[in-house]
Amino acid sequence: MTTHRFVATQWHNVLGTLPPALSIASGDIVITETLDAGGVDKDGIARSHGPNPMNGPIFVEGAEPGDALKVEILRMTPIRANGWTRTSLAGNVVDPEFVRTLPPRDKVTWAIDRQGLTVALDPPVPGLEYLVLPLEPMIGCFGVAPALGQAFSTATSAENGGNMDYRGFRPGTTVWFPVAVAGALFFVGDCHATQGDGEIVGTGIETAFEVELRLTVDKAKRLTWPRGETETDIFSVGNARPLDQALQHATTDMFVWLTTEYGLSPAAASHLMGQVVCYDVGNVFDPAYTMVCRIAKKWLAGSRAS
């Protein structure tokens, strides 16, 4: 296993079949510094432009269509003392007739205390002078190149991942992406200091991070949608619009996972999911919405995972 310190010199606003910026062996670790969603680096210098410029792509040796790329999020360290969000809810998350009452969608700055691991409005908004939030790093946009030579904007998401903005993509989480091209061609960026479910103002607290990831090829692990695992849960991710279609994708993938890898019969999977499943909203701002179907591992203790 080798650790690579990847210093990006160009960034991409699509996930697609592009020339690799780095080639690594399966199981290697990559450490890299990301830009914020607008293309600004740790020193406040604009290096690229939005939306969500990505570091990469990273070619992982041995990855072929039909495999999965296993991404372990080992560490996320904030490397800037500030971040930003928008000042208003997105128009599509409120009743249409209510949109005209929303405030302008300006930018507001948040201070990031990298020692105390907190974030706070800077300056405070009247009425929220007390508000200090815990630093809860997450990756907003990451994934692999899609099939058929496509290139998907980093403003949206699909089977290959992309801009899912799920707060569960945090240190300690492992994510699998379906590989569609040789080398997988992995991209990462758009990291948030914290964010509520749904990214309902259109941003998390956008800032720059140093991320540490382990990338491993899982051979012949044929996936349709991204999957993930934490210490306590497994989850399937669906990306689509309308929201019910994203939920359908995530639910179908979880059912397939339980029946093919955990050995449950269709009836058993239905019973289990019907009573213990949890749904998380990843993103309801972007062109494709993200829904997550999640099950606690404690309910799978008697099942077999391959």
Image (cartoon, grey):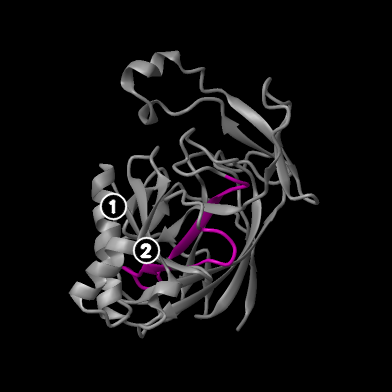
**Residue 115 shown left or right of residue 20 in the figure:** right
Residue 17 occupies which quadrant of the picture?
A: bottom left
The disc at residue 298 is none
Q: Which residues are magenta?
A: 169-194
**Residue 274 placement (x, y as % from top left):** 27, 62
Q: Which residue is mark 2?
A: 226
Label 1 neighbour load within 10 Å: few <14, some 14-19, many 20+: many
Q: Classify the position of the C terminus by image quarter.
A: bottom left
Q: Secondary structure at mark 2?
A: loop
**Residue 59 shown left or right of residue 1 in the figure:** left
Q: Is residue 15 visible?
A: no
Q: Which residue is mark 1?
A: 247
* Residue drawn at 39 percent across, 25 percent down: 91
Q: Is residue 38 visible?
A: yes
**Residue 259 placement (x, y as % from top left):** 25, 77
Label 2 or label 1, whichever comes before in sequence order: 2
Counting the numbered discs, the total is 2
In three-dimensional space, the C-alpha distance between marks 2 and 1, rounded to whole angstroms, equals 13 Å
**Is residue 111 positioned above or below 233 on the image?**
above
Q: Label 1 near label 2: C-beta < 8 Å?
A: no
Residue 251 occupies which quadrant of the picture?
A: bottom left
* Residue drawn at 72 percent across, 45 percent down: 118
Q: Amino acid at mark 1?
A: Leu
